[in-house]
Image (cartoon, coloured by chain):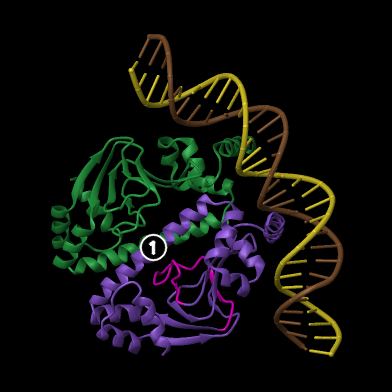
Chain colours: A purple, B green, C brown, D yellow
Amino acid sequence: MMENEIIKYLSKYIPITKEMEEVINESGFIKSFKKGTILLEEGKISNECFFIIKGCIRSFHIKDGEEKTTDFYTEEQAVTPSVYGKRIPSGSYLECLEETITGVGTPELETELYQKFPQLESLTRALVEAIMAKQQDEMDDFKMSSPEERYLHLLKTRPDLMQRVPQHQIASYLGITPESLSRIRKRMLRKE
Amino acid sequence: MMENEIIKYLSKYIPITKEMEEVINESGFIKSFKKGTILLEEGKISNECFFIIKGCIRSFHIKDGEEKTTDFYTEEQAVTPSVYGKRIPSGSYLECLEETITGVGTPELETELYQKFPQLESLTRALVEAIMAKQQDEMDDFKMSSPEERYLHLLKTRPDLMQRVPQHQIASYLGITPESLSRIRKRMLRKE
DNA sequence: TGTTTTTCTTAACTTAAGTCAACGAATTAG
DNA sequence: CTAATTCGTTGACTTAAGTTAAGAAAAACA
């Protein structure tokens, strides 16, 4: 049932055979975390990646004593720290903003799966390529936009976030201060 | 000789067998473009990706009639448009800023290679995962930095760019106007 | 070589974001 | 349920970026 969410997600990117489905269902283990749980800390080694079935995870850095939010992940999104599976300590944090249910992956599990079912490599490659293309587009958009445009874009593409995430974390995510976001919102009300 | 640059690059990410080396050498074809060549235009379908052996490629969008530079690629970097191999028209341009020599890849070539040598999938997967992790870090850095910090970061990480690329394209890449970049440079001189 | 075009800088002015401080509103915790 | 904390907004002021315009320097071109 819950595992099928993962299959549903994967099949968006590539056709899934019955065989693959079985393997994934048997191997992927599900974990639940309560609100506020820190899944990864600065300085720690990252040996887990997550697939969100239900809930919300925030990634942030601490710079000059300030939390800088860099991403929000919600249902059907994969959360892979950039140092996942490497011997490099993490530069960022992962925090559950809500009660969150995830599929959890480890390098060992991955290795095992790839050995058993080499076809999975194609799937993952296609998947990762697709995610990367999307990330590239988002990066370009971010670079080309003003804070106000970025806010409007977020409203359109992820309206749910505005309801479930504190405003000051949204501001940080947009690269501005909470005060600036407040003013942008006020400015927009006056014009419409 | 030139092909070996590609092997050299790939071997940074994963061990390369003799067999793979042969395949790559035989199949990868090399093309040379003169300065100013447009490799991809907005609205066109992208069926080529590039590996730069020598030279420099810029990717940009046109927004409100203005060129917005989103990336510079130089020696030993792979240039893969986000719509490469898809039926979606490109939203961006690719331009050679110098005489540029590249290895050129196509979806057909890729398919052929993966069929002949399934092991190549592992390599590509590892490669793409590594590139994605790097991109993620860059994205986070960009989000967390002020224009001035982004400029300092660029000076440290890619000092060569400052010599080979026009200043106003650098400014656009940093998300600011050429005038602002001028002022940042002046400000920095006064303080040091 | 001399000329055109592009590139970079400067200045004056406008606009928006950062900062500091304060104050209710909402949320959390005991 | 109340106290304490966190959160969002507002105002006054500072700082930096956008805009417009002009001119000098450098590069491309013919």
Q: Is residue A93 left or right of residue B40?
A: right
Q: Is residue A104 left or right of residue B141?
A: left
Q: In this view, does B79 lie to the left or right of B165?
A: left
Residue D9: x and y, percent? Answer: 76, 63
Residue B192: x and y, percent? Answer: 61, 37
* The quarter of the displayed image where residue B131 is located: bottom left
- Magenta segment: does it hold A81? yes
Q: Is residue D19 above or below residue A3?
A: above
Q: Is residue B44 left or right of residue B172?
A: left
- Magenta segment: does it hold B174? no
Query: Which chain letter matches label 1?
Result: A
Q: Which amino acid does label 1 sit on?
A: Met
Q: Give the range drawn in magenta.
A: A76-99
Q: Element at badge 1? A: helix
In this figure, what is the number of numbered marks?
A: 1
Determine which residue is flagged by label 1: A132
- Which residue is drawn at the image coordinates 34% and 70% (left, top)? A127
Is residue B20 or residue A24 the one in the foreground? Answer: A24
Residue B176: x and y, percent? Answer: 55, 44
Quadrant of image for the C terminus of chain A: bottom right
Is residue A103 or residue B85 the one in the foreground? Answer: B85
The crowd level at tag 1 (other Cα within 10 Å; few <14, some 14-19, many 20+) is: many
Quadrant of image for the N terminus of chain A: bottom left
Q: Is residue A136 above or below residue A1?
A: above
